[in-house]
Image (cartoon, rainbow, N blue to C red):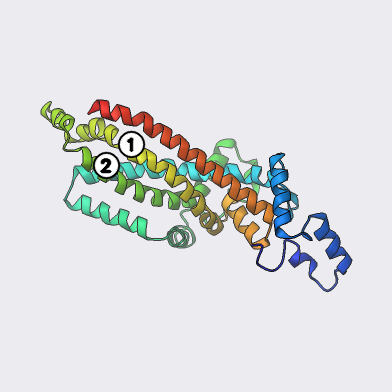
Protein backbone atom coordinates (compact mmCIF):
# COMPACT_ATOMS: atom_id res chain seq x y z
CA UNK A 1 0.00 0.00 0.00
CA UNK A 2 2.84 2.41 0.75
CA UNK A 3 4.42 1.88 -2.67
CA UNK A 4 1.15 2.62 -4.45
CA UNK A 5 0.63 6.29 -5.34
CA UNK A 6 -1.78 8.37 -3.31
CA UNK A 7 -2.98 8.43 0.30
CA UNK A 8 -6.33 8.48 2.14
CA UNK A 9 -6.92 12.07 1.03
CA UNK A 10 -5.96 11.66 -2.62
CA UNK A 11 -9.53 11.39 -3.92
CA UNK A 12 -10.93 14.19 -1.78
CA UNK A 13 -8.08 16.69 -2.09
CA UNK A 14 -6.79 16.28 -5.61
CA UNK A 15 -9.59 18.30 -7.17
CA UNK A 16 -8.73 21.46 -9.04
CA UNK A 17 -10.78 23.57 -6.62
CA UNK A 18 -8.74 22.53 -3.56
CA UNK A 19 -5.87 24.96 -2.84
CA UNK A 20 -2.42 23.42 -2.36
CA UNK A 21 -2.24 24.92 1.12
CA UNK A 22 -5.31 22.93 2.20
CA UNK A 23 -3.83 19.70 0.84
CA UNK A 24 -0.57 20.33 2.69
CA UNK A 25 -2.41 21.20 5.92
CA UNK A 26 -4.50 18.01 5.92
CA UNK A 27 -1.56 15.75 5.10
CA UNK A 28 0.54 17.41 7.79
CA UNK A 29 -2.25 17.12 10.34
CA UNK A 30 -2.45 13.33 9.92
CA UNK A 31 1.27 12.81 9.31
CA UNK A 32 1.10 11.85 5.64
CA UNK A 33 3.80 14.36 4.78
CA UNK A 34 6.34 12.08 6.52
CA UNK A 35 8.16 9.06 5.00
CA UNK A 36 6.41 5.67 5.44
CA UNK A 37 9.08 4.38 7.83
CA UNK A 38 8.64 7.30 10.18
CA UNK A 39 4.86 7.00 10.05
CA UNK A 40 5.11 3.32 10.99
CA UNK A 41 7.37 4.08 13.95
CA UNK A 42 4.90 6.71 15.16
CA UNK A 43 2.02 4.26 14.72
CA UNK A 44 3.87 1.58 16.70
CA UNK A 45 4.58 4.07 19.47
CA UNK A 46 0.92 5.08 19.64
CA UNK A 47 -0.08 1.40 19.64
CA UNK A 48 2.12 0.79 22.68
CA UNK A 49 0.02 3.43 24.45
CA UNK A 50 -3.26 1.77 23.38
CA UNK A 51 -4.01 4.20 20.54
CA UNK A 52 -4.95 2.80 17.12
CA UNK A 53 -5.09 6.10 15.27
CA UNK A 54 -7.73 7.87 13.21
CA UNK A 55 -9.60 6.31 10.28
CA UNK A 56 -9.65 9.09 7.71
CA UNK A 57 -11.96 7.16 5.38
CA UNK A 58 -14.58 6.81 8.14
CA UNK A 59 -13.93 10.16 9.87
CA UNK A 60 -13.83 8.33 13.18
CA UNK A 61 -11.20 6.84 15.51
CA UNK A 62 -10.06 3.38 14.43
CA UNK A 63 -11.08 1.88 17.79
CA UNK A 64 -14.70 2.95 17.25
CA UNK A 65 -14.80 1.47 13.76
CA UNK A 66 -13.42 -1.88 14.93
CA UNK A 67 -15.64 -1.93 18.02
CA UNK A 68 -18.66 -1.70 15.76
CA UNK A 69 -17.50 -4.17 13.08
CA UNK A 70 -15.84 -6.89 15.18
CA UNK A 71 -18.99 -8.32 16.87
CA UNK A 72 -20.66 -8.80 13.49
CA UNK A 73 -17.75 -10.77 12.14
CA UNK A 74 -17.50 -12.83 15.33
CA UNK A 75 -21.17 -13.76 15.00
CA UNK A 76 -20.70 -14.69 11.34
CA UNK A 77 -17.57 -16.77 11.96
CA UNK A 78 -18.93 -18.42 15.12
CA UNK A 79 -22.13 -19.57 13.41
CA UNK A 80 -20.12 -20.81 10.42
CA UNK A 81 -17.75 -22.77 12.68
CA UNK A 82 -20.51 -24.36 14.77
CA UNK A 83 -22.69 -25.31 11.80
CA UNK A 84 -19.70 -26.35 9.68
CA UNK A 85 -18.17 -28.60 12.32
CA UNK A 86 -21.54 -30.21 13.11
CA UNK A 87 -22.23 -30.91 9.43
CA UNK A 88 -18.68 -32.11 8.81
CA UNK A 89 -18.68 -34.56 11.72
CA UNK A 90 -22.14 -35.84 10.74
CA UNK A 91 -20.99 -36.35 7.14
CA UNK A 92 -17.86 -38.20 8.30
CA UNK A 93 -19.91 -40.51 10.54
CA UNK A 94 -22.20 -41.28 7.62
CA UNK A 95 -19.26 -42.02 5.35
CA UNK A 96 -17.64 -44.40 7.82
CA UNK A 97 -20.95 -46.09 8.61
CA UNK A 98 -21.55 -46.79 4.91
CA UNK A 99 -17.93 -47.11 3.88
CA UNK A 100 -17.31 -48.07 0.25
CA UNK A 101 -21.03 -47.83 -0.52
CA UNK A 102 -22.85 -45.16 -2.48
CA UNK A 103 -23.45 -42.77 0.48
CA UNK A 104 -19.71 -42.76 1.18
CA UNK A 105 -18.86 -42.06 -2.45
CA UNK A 106 -21.54 -39.37 -2.78
CA UNK A 107 -20.51 -37.54 0.39
CA UNK A 108 -16.85 -37.91 -0.58
CA UNK A 109 -17.51 -36.23 -3.93
CA UNK A 110 -19.48 -33.42 -2.26
CA UNK A 111 -16.79 -32.73 0.34
CA UNK A 112 -14.08 -32.81 -2.33
CA UNK A 113 -16.03 -30.23 -4.33
CA UNK A 114 -16.47 -28.16 -1.17
CA UNK A 115 -12.70 -28.03 -0.70
CA UNK A 116 -11.91 -27.39 -4.36
CA UNK A 117 -14.52 -24.75 -5.30
CA UNK A 118 -13.56 -21.21 -4.20
CA UNK A 119 -15.72 -19.60 -1.53
CA UNK A 120 -16.51 -16.54 -3.65
CA UNK A 121 -17.92 -18.75 -6.43
CA UNK A 122 -20.19 -20.58 -3.98
CA UNK A 123 -21.24 -17.19 -2.60
CA UNK A 124 -22.12 -15.84 -6.04
CA UNK A 125 -24.09 -18.99 -6.91
CA UNK A 126 -25.98 -18.84 -3.60
CA UNK A 127 -26.73 -15.15 -4.08
CA UNK A 128 -27.92 -15.72 -7.64
CA UNK A 129 -30.13 -18.76 -7.04
CA UNK A 130 -31.21 -18.66 -3.39
CA UNK A 131 -31.36 -14.88 -3.22
CA UNK A 132 -32.06 -13.09 -6.48
CA UNK A 133 -33.85 -15.83 -8.45
CA UNK A 134 -35.75 -17.90 -5.88
CA UNK A 135 -35.94 -15.13 -3.24
CA UNK A 136 -35.55 -17.56 -0.34
CA UNK A 137 -32.98 -15.43 1.51
CA UNK A 138 -32.02 -11.75 1.36
CA UNK A 139 -28.79 -11.06 -0.48
CA UNK A 140 -27.29 -8.23 1.59
CA UNK A 141 -27.38 -6.35 4.86
CA UNK A 142 -27.96 -7.07 8.54
CA UNK A 143 -31.72 -6.70 8.52
CA UNK A 144 -34.77 -5.52 6.65
CA UNK A 145 -35.24 -1.84 5.90
CA UNK A 146 -38.26 0.32 6.58
CA UNK A 147 -40.01 -0.02 9.93
CA UNK A 148 -38.01 -3.08 11.01
CA UNK A 149 -36.60 -1.13 13.99
CA UNK A 150 -40.10 -1.03 15.48
CA UNK A 151 -40.59 -4.80 15.30
CA UNK A 152 -40.66 -6.91 18.48
CA UNK A 153 -37.34 -8.34 19.61
CA UNK A 154 -38.12 -11.89 18.49
CA UNK A 155 -39.06 -10.72 14.99
CA UNK A 156 -35.84 -8.70 14.70
CA UNK A 157 -33.86 -11.75 15.87
CA UNK A 158 -35.47 -13.94 13.22
CA UNK A 159 -34.88 -11.26 10.59
CA UNK A 160 -31.20 -11.05 11.62
CA UNK A 161 -30.78 -14.84 11.35
CA UNK A 162 -32.55 -14.75 7.98
CA UNK A 163 -29.99 -12.25 6.68
CA UNK A 164 -27.17 -14.22 8.31
CA UNK A 165 -28.14 -17.48 6.59
CA UNK A 166 -26.42 -16.99 3.23
CA UNK A 167 -23.01 -15.60 4.29
CA UNK A 168 -22.73 -17.96 7.27
CA UNK A 169 -23.98 -20.87 5.18
CA UNK A 170 -21.33 -20.36 2.50
CA UNK A 171 -18.55 -20.27 5.10
CA UNK A 172 -20.07 -23.26 6.92
CA UNK A 173 -20.05 -25.37 3.76
CA UNK A 174 -16.34 -24.76 3.31
CA UNK A 175 -15.65 -25.67 6.95
CA UNK A 176 -17.87 -28.76 6.75
CA UNK A 177 -16.04 -30.08 3.69
CA UNK A 178 -12.62 -29.85 5.34
CA UNK A 179 -13.83 -31.23 8.67
CA UNK A 180 -15.57 -34.17 7.00
CA UNK A 181 -12.44 -35.26 5.15
CA UNK A 182 -10.23 -34.98 8.24
CA UNK A 183 -12.78 -36.61 10.53
CA UNK A 184 -13.36 -39.53 8.17
CA UNK A 185 -9.63 -40.28 8.05
CA UNK A 186 -9.38 -40.04 11.85
CA UNK A 187 -12.36 -42.36 12.35
CA UNK A 188 -11.00 -44.96 9.95
CA UNK A 189 -7.71 -44.90 11.85
CA UNK A 190 -9.38 -46.04 15.08
CA UNK A 191 -11.94 -48.46 13.65
CA UNK A 192 -9.50 -51.40 13.91
CA UNK A 193 -8.50 -50.76 17.52
CA UNK A 194 -9.17 -53.29 20.26
CA UNK A 195 -11.71 -51.15 22.11
CA UNK A 196 -13.84 -51.00 18.94
CA UNK A 197 -13.79 -54.81 18.68
CA UNK A 198 -14.77 -55.01 22.35
CA UNK A 199 -17.69 -52.64 21.82
CA UNK A 200 -18.92 -54.68 18.89
CA UNK A 201 -18.53 -57.90 20.89
CA UNK A 202 -20.88 -56.46 23.50
CA UNK A 203 -23.58 -56.33 20.84
CA UNK A 204 -23.74 -52.56 20.40
CA UNK A 205 -25.23 -51.19 17.21
CA UNK A 206 -22.79 -49.81 14.66
CA UNK A 207 -24.03 -46.25 15.16
CA UNK A 208 -23.48 -46.60 18.92
CA UNK A 209 -19.97 -47.89 18.29
CA UNK A 210 -19.22 -44.93 16.05
CA UNK A 211 -20.75 -42.20 18.20
CA UNK A 212 -19.94 -43.45 21.71
CA UNK A 213 -16.55 -45.08 21.17
CA UNK A 214 -14.91 -44.18 17.84
CA UNK A 215 -15.80 -40.47 17.68
CA UNK A 216 -14.52 -39.45 21.16
CA UNK A 217 -11.18 -41.12 20.36
CA UNK A 218 -10.90 -39.60 16.87
CA UNK A 219 -12.00 -36.04 17.60
CA UNK A 220 -8.51 -34.78 18.59
CA UNK A 221 -7.20 -33.99 15.07
CA UNK A 222 -10.45 -32.20 14.23
CA UNK A 223 -10.21 -30.05 17.36
CA UNK A 224 -6.71 -29.08 16.28
CA UNK A 225 -8.15 -28.25 12.85
CA UNK A 226 -10.38 -25.68 14.53
CA UNK A 227 -7.33 -23.51 15.24
CA UNK A 228 -6.41 -23.61 11.55
CA UNK A 229 -9.96 -23.04 10.33
CA UNK A 230 -10.46 -19.76 12.18
CA UNK A 231 -7.68 -17.82 10.38
CA UNK A 232 -8.91 -19.09 7.03
CA UNK A 233 -12.45 -18.07 7.95
CA UNK A 234 -11.30 -14.59 8.93
CA UNK A 235 -9.52 -14.30 5.58
CA UNK A 236 -12.46 -15.74 3.67
CA UNK A 237 -14.85 -13.37 5.43
CA UNK A 238 -13.26 -10.45 3.57
CA UNK A 239 -14.73 -11.57 0.26
CA UNK A 240 -17.89 -13.09 1.74
CA UNK A 241 -18.75 -9.90 3.63
CA UNK A 242 -18.00 -7.85 0.53
CA UNK A 243 -20.26 -9.99 -1.65
CA UNK A 244 -23.17 -10.06 0.80
CA UNK A 245 -22.70 -6.54 2.13
CA UNK A 246 -22.20 -7.79 5.68
CA UNK A 247 -20.76 -4.79 7.59
CA UNK A 248 -18.12 -6.64 9.60
CA UNK A 249 -14.35 -6.72 9.81
CA UNK A 250 -13.96 -8.15 6.32
CA UNK A 251 -15.95 -5.41 4.61
CA UNK A 252 -14.24 -2.79 6.78
CA UNK A 253 -10.82 -4.07 5.74
CA UNK A 254 -11.83 -4.24 2.08
CA UNK A 255 -13.06 -0.64 2.07
CA UNK A 256 -9.98 0.50 4.01
CA UNK A 257 -7.71 -1.10 1.41
CA UNK A 258 -9.47 0.72 -1.41
CA UNK A 259 -9.29 4.01 0.50
CA UNK A 260 -5.62 3.45 1.49
CA UNK A 261 -6.61 4.02 5.11
CA UNK A 262 -3.31 2.78 6.58
CA UNK A 263 -4.18 2.98 10.32
CA UNK A 264 -7.45 1.11 9.80
CA UNK A 265 -5.79 -1.59 7.67
CA UNK A 266 -2.97 -2.09 10.17
CA UNK A 267 -5.36 -2.28 13.12
CA UNK A 268 -7.73 -4.70 11.35
CA UNK A 269 -4.90 -7.04 10.32
CA UNK A 270 -3.38 -6.85 13.81
CA UNK A 271 -6.70 -7.68 15.46
CA UNK A 272 -7.36 -10.59 13.09
CA UNK A 273 -3.88 -11.93 13.78
CA UNK A 274 -4.39 -11.75 17.54
CA UNK A 275 -7.71 -13.60 17.25
CA UNK A 276 -6.10 -16.31 15.11
CA UNK A 277 -3.16 -16.78 17.49
CA UNK A 278 -5.40 -16.96 20.56
CA UNK A 279 -7.73 -19.43 18.84
CA UNK A 280 -4.81 -21.63 17.81
CA UNK A 281 -3.42 -21.60 21.36
CA UNK A 282 -6.80 -22.53 22.83
CA UNK A 283 -7.39 -25.38 20.39
CA UNK A 284 -3.87 -26.72 20.99
CA UNK A 285 -4.58 -26.69 24.74
CA UNK A 286 -7.88 -28.54 24.22
CA UNK A 287 -6.16 -31.08 21.97
CA UNK A 288 -3.56 -31.69 24.67
CA UNK A 289 -6.35 -32.33 27.17
CA UNK A 290 -8.12 -34.70 24.77
CA UNK A 291 -4.98 -36.67 23.86
CA UNK A 292 -4.39 -38.27 27.30
CA UNK A 293 -8.04 -39.30 27.45
CA UNK A 294 -7.72 -40.92 24.07
CA UNK A 295 -4.61 -42.80 25.12
CA UNK A 296 -6.20 -44.01 28.38
CA UNK A 297 -9.38 -45.01 26.57
CA UNK A 298 -7.43 -47.16 24.17
- For this view, does 206 lie left or right of residue 14? left
Q: Quadrant of residue 213?
A: top left
> Secondary structure beneath disc 1?
helix
Q: Is residue 143 visible?
A: no
Q: Quadrant of the N terminus?
A: bottom right
Q: Is residue 254 above or below residue 191?
A: below
Between 212 and 265, which is closer to the camera in this rendering? 265
Q: Residue furthest bottom?
A: 16
Between 161 and 256, which is closer to the camera in this rendering? 256
Residue sitting at x 43%, y 42%: 227
Q: Residues within 10 Å of mark 1 (few under 14, many from 20)?
A: many
Q: Residues within 10 Å of mark 2 (few under 14, many from 20)?
A: many
Label at residue 56? none
Marks 1 and 2, Cα distance to the nearest angstrom? 9 Å
- For this view, does 26 lie left or right of residue 237? right
Label at residue 186? 2
At which x and y percent is residue 42?
73, 49
Between 66 and 220, which is closer to the camera in this rendering? 220
Q: Quadrant of residue 245?
A: bottom right
> Secondary structure beneath disc 2?
helix
Tell me the residue that label 1 is attached to. 220
Q: Is residue 287 visible?
A: yes
CB contact under 8 Å: marks 1 and 2: yes
Residue sitting at x 38%, y 61%: 117
At which x and y percent is residue 68?
65, 44
At which x and y percent is residue 258?
64, 62
Residue sitting at x 64%, y 54%: 265
Q: Quadrant of the C terminus?
A: top left
Which numbered disc, 1 or 2, marks the residue that appears first in the sequence?
2
Q: Is residue 12 above or below residue 65?
A: below
At which x and y percent is residue 260?
67, 61
- For this view, does 165 lie left or right of residue 27? left
Amino acid sequence: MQFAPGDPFATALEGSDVPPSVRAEWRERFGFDQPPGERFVRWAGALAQGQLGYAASRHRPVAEVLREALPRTLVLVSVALIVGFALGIAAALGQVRYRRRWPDRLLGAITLAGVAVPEFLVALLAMTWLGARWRIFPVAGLGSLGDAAAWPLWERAIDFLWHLALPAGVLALTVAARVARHQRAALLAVMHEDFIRTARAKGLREWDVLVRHALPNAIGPVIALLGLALPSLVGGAVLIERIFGWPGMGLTLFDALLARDYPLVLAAVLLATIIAVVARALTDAVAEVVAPRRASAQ
